[in-house]
Amino acid sequence: MIIVAGWLATDIWRWLGVLVGGRLREDSEALMWVRAVATALVAGVISRLILFPTGALAGSPLGLRIAAASIGFVAFLLSRQKVVVGVLTAEVVLVVGWLAIGGVR
């Protein structure tokens, strides 16, 4: 029962997106609003992970998390805005930095 409820809750929006998406122009106000909201949500999640982490990430210093995000952003810009490069660079900096300060117990 819960699988059906979860499927209905997400699939309705997918089908609505398919139906309406073909009619929207790429420079329309509605699509610009959707992009802005999506960008704000991603920025909020990333900020929360950096400033108020949970789990294993909470054991890493704030400076290391900020440095990893900053270096990842620079790598993203230098790689002609390839998201994968930025994310992987930030992860490597975070893991190597965490290991360097003795993060493994």
Image (cartoon, rainbow, N blue to C red):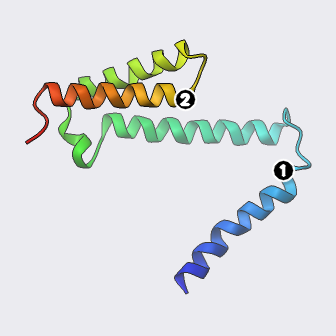
Quadrant of the image containing the C terminus: top left
Q: Residue furthest top?
A: 78
- Where is residue 9? Give x, y as percent: 64, 71
Q: Residue furthest right?
A: 23
Q: Residue furthest left?
A: 105
> Camera-side residue: 83 or 8?
83
| Residue highlighted by disc 1 | 21
> What crowding class fits label 2: few (fewer than 14 Cα within 10 Å), some (14-19), or many (20 or more)?
some
- Where is residue 99? Give x, y as percent: 17, 30
> What crowding class fits label 1: few (fewer than 14 Cα within 10 Å), some (14-19), or many (20 or more)?
few
| Residue at x-position 38% and y-position 40% | 48
- Where is residue 62? Give x, y as percent: 24, 28
| Residue highlighted by disc 2 | 83
Q: Examine the rendered structure and indicate whether residue 51 appears above or below residue 13.
A: above
| Residue at x-position 78% and y-position 64% | 15
User: Nearer the viewer's eye, disc 1 or disc 2?
Assistant: 2
> Camera-side residue: 48 or 82?
82
Element under disc 1:
helix
The image quarter containing residue 7 is bottom right
Question: Residue 89: which numbered mark, if any?
Answer: none
Q: Is residue 98 left or right of residue 44?
A: left
| Residue at x-position 80% and y-position 42% | 30
